[in-house]
Image: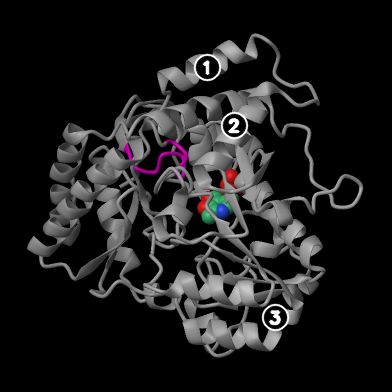
Amino acid sequence: MSIQGTKTKALYQQATSTIPFGVSSNFRYWGPDDTMVMTKAQGPHMWDADGKQYIDYRLGFGPVILGHAHPEVNRRVTEAIQEGTIFAWMTPLEIDICERIARMTGMDMVRLTNTGTEATMHSLRIARAHTNREKFIKYEGAYHGMCDYYLYSTASSRANALGSRRSPIPQQNSSGIPKGISQYVYTLPFNDEERLEELIEQSWHDVAALIIEPTMGNMAGIAPQPGYLEKVRELTAKYGIVLIFDEVKTGFRLANGGAQEVFGIRADMATYAKSLGNGYPIAAIAGSRDVMMTLEPGAVSHGGTYVGNVVGTAAAQAVLEILETQPILKEIAQRGKQLMDGIDEILTEADIPHCMTGLPAMFGYILGIEEPPADFRAYARGDAAMYEKIAMQLIHRGVMPDADGREPWFMCHAHDDKIISQTLEVFKEAVYAARN
Ligand SMILES: Cc1ncc(COP(=O)(O)O)c(C=O)c1O
């Protein structure tokens, strides 16, 4: 049964005549009967074109940390844009938020971008310029944005096409990427210290960067095993490889200092986006002074018409002020834990084999396996079809996680106790409906 109501369906049909497949991003395409058109979002809720209300756990793929249409963030943006939106010069807002990002993350220096993709793309160029090396390491199942270099062995790959874990085959995820790009990419299974050590010891002289999602925000939030990130840090430091934490999903979500704070690891560079703007487009690259000062004008390129624009920076200033002065992320983590525990209990009572993954602010669950998987290969053995069945039952009942279990459940500060108990009631119904 389609999740589109009649108005949603009509708008979607209209979209298909001028927009390929009726969507501006392929990630929003759920097929002709289930691609949605939304008209409003506020706090923890979102409404579709038929006026149906959902408790939103996709949160725009993660950015909405405070709640949709947060009044203070909107007020600050509205006020700021009265004075102009773009100057092709620095603004006090930019300086202020870069200082805040540095202070909160512990990084020395910051440059702004507009999207996560731009941040990860530029971070790779900086690492290459800094090391005078060309290759880089990424993890199977990790997504770092739309740049050609990173579209290898993401969670959209077929796990059985990745080759032996001793010699992983980078799987290109899209047509339209020049074949030659693959020669710059090494892929690795997450959490496998032996393979990591082997690869780095053999190939370090070619490797500019290792980019890692410190918890796998595009693979059900799978967490690093104890000691793994420490090993990554030790080896990259030893061989002069720039360690890039891709904190596009984890930054300003897991803690004010992101995954670096949670796991106690200092990367050489970190990329931030999503929660930084609570839904307004803004992103950042932060790093050590040594690495970031590679960005010498005329020597290494970084720029963009809209970087540092007033809309994004005003939103980020409001978000960061709120996060710095209120225990928002601690409260989100507590409520996320409540929701995770509730889901775990319902699945256990229903006798459905499963494991819980991720951290409370960004968690997942995998059906059909009981040990949290260490990597994408193990994740892929889960029961994705049953996950989708439950998710669709939830959506029919007004609770919206992603139908794809690779995408975690995102929590925001507007998910209060009442919303969590409503969600759990619906979750229980959805599980039994899907099972029967
Ligand atoms: C970990 C990670 N890095 C980078 C990106 C790309 O960010 P954007 O979609 O803002 O370009 C994403 C997007 O989901 C992401 O999850």
Q: CA distance from mark 1 to mark 2?
A: 14 Å
Quadrant assignment, res 241: bottom right
- Pointer 3 with pointer 1, Cβ within 8 A: no
Display colour scheme? one colour
Direction left: furthest residue: 349
Task: Answer above or below: position of 333 versus 187.
Answer: above
Disc 3 vs disc 1: which is toward the camera? Answer: 3
Answer whether residue 250 is visible to the viewer in this image: no
Give the residue type that dot 3 points to. Trp
Asked which secondary structure carries label 3, the reply is helix
Quadrant assignment, res 332: top left
Per the rendered image, the range of residues in magenta is: 56-64
Location of mark 1 (residue): 76
Q: CA distance from mark 3 to mark 2?
A: 35 Å
Give the residue type that dot 2 points to. Ile
Which mark identifies residue 97?
2
Query: Was residue 236 drawn as part of the magenta stretch in this picture?
Result: no
The x, y position of residue 412, in whole percent, is 35, 37
